[in-house]
Amino acid sequence: MIPYDKLVRDRIPEIIETEGKHCQVRVLDEAEYARRLDEKLAEELEEYQRSGDVEELVNLLEVVRAIAASHGLPWDEVERRRLAKQEARGGFSKRLLLQRVDGGEQGRPDEELENGLLPAQVPGSSPSAGGGTVRSGRAEPSGRA
């Protein structure tokens, strides 16, 4: 028997049995389940980063759903919170790279943004990754190709 010692999807034992093989499984308690989900999250992320295969994103999303459920958070609530955050702070479709923030105390950009510093509140301008300029939170193309 080959040892695996890893969290698997619910139907994997059934699939193994239909292939004429035998497997041994056990049901995890809550604490170990949480730990194994964290391990699985890291595993699936690493597989996606290594391969770039979109199918790995499907696996990653399934693990995220299981983590949310383990916290008692229904998926529709996760989606509601995601949409609220997207509405308030935007998504990632503009491909913006925050290069620096001038003024105020120095801290992590994510802390500053979480504490209410929005791009429109950043004085002046800074260069954007696409060669344009960001002023008052809006990217303006530079005209370079």
Image (cartoon, rainbow, N blue to C red):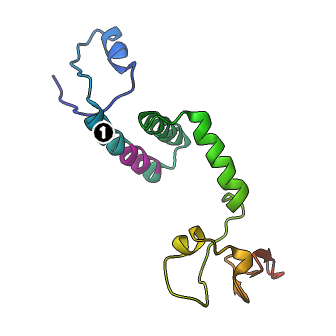
Give the residue number, with chain letter if any, for mark 1: 36
Depicted 31 relative to depicted 127: above or below: above
Dividing the image into 4 quarters, which one contains the C terminus?
bottom right
Residue drawn 30% across and 33% down?
A: 30
Q: Quadrant of residue 32?
A: top left
Residue 77 on image: x %, y %: 60, 38
> Is 14 situated above or below 78?
above
Q: Can residue 130 be seen in this view?
A: no
Whether residue 69 is visible to the viewer of this picture, yes or no, is: yes
The answer to whether 75 appears left or right of 27 in the picture is: right
At 40% across and 18% down in the image, what residue appears?
Answer: 11
Q: Which stretch did the figure color magenta?
A: 41-48
Residue lying at the far left of the rendered structure: 1
Task: Judge whether 141 appears above or below 43 on screen.
Answer: below
7 within the magenta span:
no
Mark 1 neighbour density, 10 Å: few (under 14) some (14–19) many (20 or more): some
Instruction: Residue 72 in the image: state x and y as whole percent.
Output: 46, 34
Majority secondary structure of the magenta segment? helix
Q: What residue type is labelled 1?
A: Arg
Relative to 42, say whether 23 is above or below: above
At horizontal 61% and vertical 89% (from top left) the residue drawn is: 102
* The quarter of the displayed image where residue 86 is located: bottom right
Secondary structure, mark 1, is helix
**Near-viewer residue (84 or 4):** 84
Q: Where is residue 103 in the image (x, y as percent from the top left)?
A: 61, 91
Q: Can residue 42 be found in the magenta stretch?
A: yes
Instruction: Say which quadrant the N terminus sits in.
Output: top left
Horizontal relation, residue 38 to residue 71: left or right: left
